[in-house]
Amino acid sequence: MSDKDIEMLIELAKVKLEEAKHMSKKEAILSLNKAGILTKKGKFMKVYSKLEEAES
């Protein structure tokens, strides 16, 4: 991977982080659902259940 590729990925990450800052709760849950992290009801998927325990 070239330095140019790395710079492009960093810029993309910055854009996505900025977009995430302006998401509604519903949009954030939908995004995490599409990534397979949360259910549609906002609960962690089974493989991430330890994160839910840590949240308490």
Image (spheres, rainbow, N blue to C red):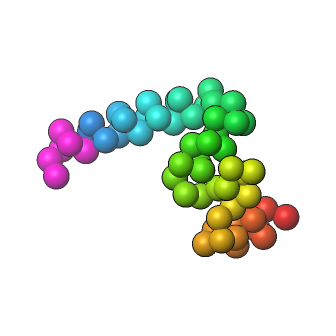
Q: Is residue 18 left or right of residue 13?
A: right
Against 50, is 30 above or below? above
- Magenta part of the chain: 1-6
Is 56 colored magenta in this rendering?
A: no
- Residue 53 placed where, x, y %? 78, 70
| Along the viewing direction, whichever of 17 and 34 lies nearer the viewer | 34
Against 2, is 47 above or below? below
Q: In which image quadrant can residue 38 be found?
A: bottom right
**Image point (72%, 36%), residue name:** 25
Q: In this view, does 17 lie to the left or right of 33?
A: left
In the rendered image, the residue lying farthest to the right is 56
Q: In which image quadrant can residue 8 be found?
A: top left
Total number of numbered labels? 0
**Image point (60%, 50%), residue name:** 33
Q: In which image quadrant can residue 52 be found?
A: bottom right
**Image point (63%, 30%), residue name:** 23
Looking at the rendering, in which quadrant would you find the C terminus? bottom right
Against 1, is 52 above or below? below
Q: Is the magenta stretch mostly helix, strand or loop?
A: helix
**Image point (53%, 29%), residue name:** 19
In the rendered image, the residue lying farthest to the left is 2
| Along the viewing direction, whichever of 7 and 50 lies nearer the viewer | 50
In the rendered image, the residue lying farthest to the top is 22
- Residue 46 placed where, x, y %? 66, 71
